[in-house]
Image: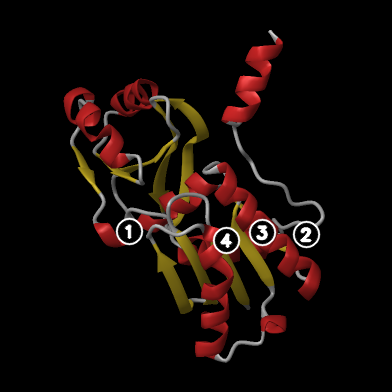
Amino acid sequence: MKILGLDSSGLVASVAVVQEGNLLAEYTVNYKKTHSQTLLPMLDEIVRMTELDLHEIDAIAVAAGPGSFTGLRIGSATAKGLGFALDKPLIHIPTVDGLAYNLWGSRDLVCPLMDARRNQTYTGLYEFVDGKMRIKREQCAVAIDEIIDNVNREQRPTVFLGDGVPVFQAYISEHCQVPFQFAPAHMNKQRASAVASLGLLYFQEGKYETAAEHTPDYLRLSQAERERLAQQK
């Protein structure tokens, strides 16, 4: 069983192919280019290097939000286009869940932090028990003080990861009352390999959808929509 994973939900663009317990290929870029410039060329390179026939994949797992509005649209459009062209199902992976899955096996509480601007973060709380990821708090868009209060109530050592860590590091250091650490560089950002691996589990559980059914999860209104509503009021 082969799963193609796509993640363009944040600053990172990432493409991967997972076959059962093997990561066949992954291409991840965290640089100053738009995902519209990188995502398809990265997929083309993986196809070329692995001699992959895209018709052989079983499903396409995509980080479906929350995250960058533009990035989510690019990732979803790419996944939907491939799904229609190849007649393959899509696997809807919550972005924060996929980010947490980078730390599979962690004994500590896992708290992903994505910078949602305006002192807010896309976040959640996760733990790993008996080889499975359990969601302690589902992904949400909240102020940083709310999720840190939640962490403190759990009274467990916690590891933070995500592009929100540099933004909120000073606040965490001052207000977090439990032992904590920050994930290292190779696992602290979105990776399509985690999306594809989690997608494989979801696919085996029957959690997939058609390309026509797929829509991103934004969790909150875009800035343009907020401004329009403010003008209407």
Front in this rendered view, residue 208 or 85 = 85
What's the residue type where badge 2 is placed?
Ala
Eyeballing the image, is 97 above or below 45? Answer: above
Of the two numbered discs 4 and 2 in the rendering, the one whose residue sits closer to the viewer: 4
Tell me if residue 138 comes above or below residue 177 in the rendering: below
Mark 1 burial class by Cα count in 10 Å: few <14, some 14-19, many 20+: some
Q: Nearer the viewer, mark 3 or mark 2?
A: 2
Is mark 3 in CB contact (under 8 Å) with mark 1? Answer: no
Label 1 is placed on what type of residue?
Answer: Met
Q: SS class of the residue under badge 2?
A: loop
Residue underneath mark 4 = 36
Looking at the picture, does residue 216 appear above or below residue 1? above
Quadrant housing residue 39: bottom right
Residue 211 - label: 2
**Which colour style is shown?**
secondary structure
Label 3, secondary structure: give it: strand
User: Label 3: which residue?
Assistant: 91
The reply to whether discs 1 and 4 touch (Cβ–Cβ < 8 Å) is: no
Q: Are marks 1 and 2 in contact (CB under 8 Å)?
A: no
Mark 3 / mark 4, whichever is N-terminal:
4
Question: For the residues marked 4 and 2, what is the alpha-carbon distance in whole angstroms?
Answer: 19 Å
Q: Nearer the viewer, residue 20 or 66?
A: 66
What whole-number distance in Å separates the C-alpha atoms at marks 3 and 1? 22 Å
Q: Which residue is mark 1?
A: 187
